[in-house]
Amino acid sequence: MKTFTATPADIDKKWIIIDAEGVVLGRLASIVAMRLRGKHKPSFTPHMDMGDNVIIINADKVQLTGKKREERYYWHTGYPGGIKYRTKEQILEGDHPERVVTLAIKRMLPGNRLSRQQMTNLRVYAGAEHPHEAQSPEVLDVKSMNSKNTRV
């Protein structure tokens, strides 16, 4: 028996919509990262973009446990003394609350060209509206998958 290796003709991408309201950020990010990579499929091939297209709505209502709201995101402007930071709470209450969810998912993927390509299959929206109704996405209930007594 030979090992199965997927080709571009074998790839079947679905559209999935996830409501992030009340879901813990880390648990949401791990499930979405697995879906983006395609590891939930039996035909997973590590060097191919096998993952689904994921739409996340209500990203501004994501849950953070403990003191994670006070944790900081750092960046550097490129100028001397140009290190800056914002807390997750400031970002969630600011203009772009979807960046917290996007960064959490991005950091759970490997840092290579393939993961940058897979991140283009992710769409995150702060509110409940999204422009992807034409793709007729399937609803994935992450809240039921994320109770402490069940495993994914």
Image (cartoon, rainbow, N blue to C red):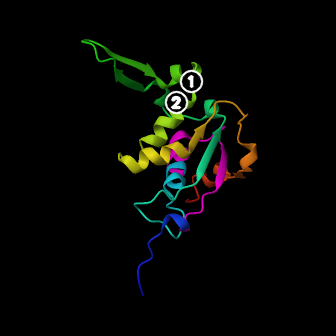
- Nearest the eye: 147 or 39: 39
At 69% from the left and 30% from the top, the residue drawn is 127
Image quarter in which the N terminus is found:
bottom left
Image quarter in which the C terminus is found:
bottom right
Q: Is residue 51 depicted above or below 119 in this figure?
A: below
Disc 1 marks a residue whose amino acid type is: His
At 48% from the left and 66% from the top, the residue drawn is 44
At 58% from the left and 19% from the top, the residue drawn is 95
Disc 2 marks a residue whose amino acid type is: Arg
Evaluate if marks 1 and 2 touch, with contact meaning CB atoms under 8 Å apart. Answer: yes
Q: Residue furthest front?
A: 9
At 51% from the left and 70% from the top, the residue drawn is 43
Q: Which residues are magenta?
A: 10-31
Q: Position of residue 45 (x, y in %)?
A: 44, 65
Q: Residue furthest bottom?
A: 1
Residue at disc 1, secondary structure:
loop
Q: Position of residue 135 (x, y in %)?
A: 71, 49
Q: Position of residue 122 (x, y in %)?
A: 56, 43
Q: Is residue 140 left or right of residue 31?
A: right
For disc 1, the marked residue is: 96
Which label is found at residue 99? Answer: 2
Q: How many marks?
A: 2
Q: Is residue 145 depicted above or below 43 in this figure?
A: above
